[in-house]
Amino acid sequence: MRLMALDIGERRIGIAVSESGILATPHSVLQRKSKQEDFARLRRLVTELKMERVIVGLPYSLSDPEEIGPQARRVMRYAEALAATLPVPIEYFDERYSTVDAAASLSALGEKKVAIDAAAAAVILQNYLDSLKDNSINQGYEPGMDSDNG
């Protein structure tokens, strides 16, 4: 499954992709302008890359995973408006610690070129893919497997 993840911030949107349904990679960072321009650029990217679903990182509360705070509500309003313009469905996924994890990984690798926002989106997407794999192991299916192959 071809997936895209978005780490939606106030000024930038980190973008990551997975073409295999197994491994997430940072793609790019979109500098936010207007909703109309942002949505057009994201729609074009989804179409060009032939994405099948967009995963949106949702910043749940650190103290209560069921609690949705003001930042999460802003992200949801933005994502819901975006969803109305996309040819594919969106899905929310917990993004807690994604930026911290991305920064630690980039630091450990000595990587300075990859933008932290795109790396955070890759962490969100990889965590999403891993959760699919964890869930599917119990059902005998692994992401990336063709249904004809078993």
Image (cartoon, rainbow, N blue to C red):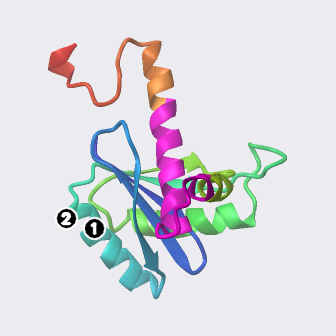
Tell me the element at label 2.
helix
Q: Residue 63: where, in percent of width, then height?
A: 84, 47
Q: Nearer the viewer, residue 107 or 75?
A: 107
Q: Residue 48: where, in percent of width, then height?
A: 19, 64
Q: Are marks 1 and 2 in contact (CB under 8 Å)?
A: yes
Structural crowding at the residue carrying mark 2, measured as other residues with C-alpha within 10 Å and reported as few (<14), some (14–19) or many (≥20): few
Amino acid beneath label 1: Leu
Q: On the image, which quarter does residue 133 sit in? A: top left
Q: Residue at position x 33%, y 68% from top?
A: 85
Structural crowding at the residue carrying mark 1, measured as other residues with C-alpha within 10 Å and reported as few (<14), some (14–19) or many (≥20): some
Horizontal relation, residue 79 to residue 19: left or right: right
Horizontal relation, residue 70 to residue 150: left or right: right
User: Which span of residues is magenta-colored?
Assistant: 105-131
Q: On the image, which quarter does residue 87 sit in? A: bottom left
Q: Nearer the viewer, residue 59 or 106?
A: 106
Q: Is residue 62 magenta?
A: no
Q: Nearer the viewer, residue 36 or 131?
A: 131
Please give the label number shown on residue 48. Answer: 2
Q: Residue furthest left?
A: 148
Q: Residue furthest bottom?
A: 33
Amino acid beneath label 2: Glu
Tell me the element at label 1.
helix
Q: Residue at position x 66%, y 63% from top?
A: 73
Horizontal relation, residue 12 to residue 85: left or right: right
Check disc 1 and report the residue beneath it: 45
